[in-house]
Image: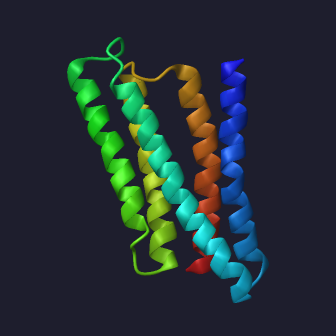
């Protein structure tokens, strides 16, 4: 049941990316685009921080991985949260959305690394890959419209 619920919540969590991107594409009017861009960028930062929290939680589990792999994972989890905060300070939406896209892919790559060292279960890697694909595609589409 937990796996199904996790899949449902992960895909539901990707929906705001799709909706914000659709709003960006739907209109050139600033009263639609500005809130959609703001929503996309801030939600990206929130989700990146959330993913960093997941990595932190997995890294501190003593029953998985080695001490050194857990230490690296702990560092990666902190980097993703700090980078998420930093993207909010970038000078324009193109930079913000582009950085969010790069960070989503980077955190997914970090999860792949963690999985290869026994810190993540296979089903979670599959879930993260599917959700990250939806999110990355949405961010790429938004970036294409904004650039």
Where residue 53 sits in the image (x, y, percent)? 43, 39
Horizontal side of 127 relative to 76 (left or right) equals right
Rendered image quadrant of residue 109? top left
Observer-nearest residue: 38 or 117? Answer: 38
From the viewer's perspective, is residue 5 above or below residue 91?
A: above
Furthest toward the bottom, the residue is: 29
Where residue 123 sits in the image (x, y, percent)? 59, 22
Q: Quadrant of the N terminus?
A: top right
From the viewer's perspective, is residue 125 above or below residue 23?
A: above
From the viewer's perspective, is residue 123 above or below residue 91?
A: above
Rendered image quadrant of residue 118? top left
Horizontal side of 10 relative to 54 (left or right) equals right
Residue at image point 69% right, 67% down: 21
Furthest toward the right, the residue is: 26
Where residue 34 sits in the image (x, y, percent)? 64, 80
The image shows a total of numbered marks equal to 0
């Amino acid at each position: 049941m937990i796996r199904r619920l996790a899949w449902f919540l992960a895909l539901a969590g990707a929906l705001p990316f799709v909706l914000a991107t659709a709003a960006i594409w739907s209109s050139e009017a600033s009263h639609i685009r500005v809130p959609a861009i703001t929503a996309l960028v801030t939600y990206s930062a929130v989700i990146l921080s959330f993913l960093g929290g997941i990595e932190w939680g997995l890294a501190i589990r003593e029953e998985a991985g080695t001490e050194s792999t857990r230490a690296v994972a702990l560092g990666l989890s902190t980097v993703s949260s700090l980078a998420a905060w930093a993207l909010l300070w970038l000078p324009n939406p193109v930079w913000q959305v582009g950085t969010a896209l790069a960070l989503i892919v980077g955190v997914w790559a970090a999860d792949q690394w963690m999985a290869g060292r026994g810190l993540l279960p296979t089903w979670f890697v599959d879930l993260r890959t599917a959700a990250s694909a939806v999110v990355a595609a949405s961010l790429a589409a938004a970036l294409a419209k904004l650039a």
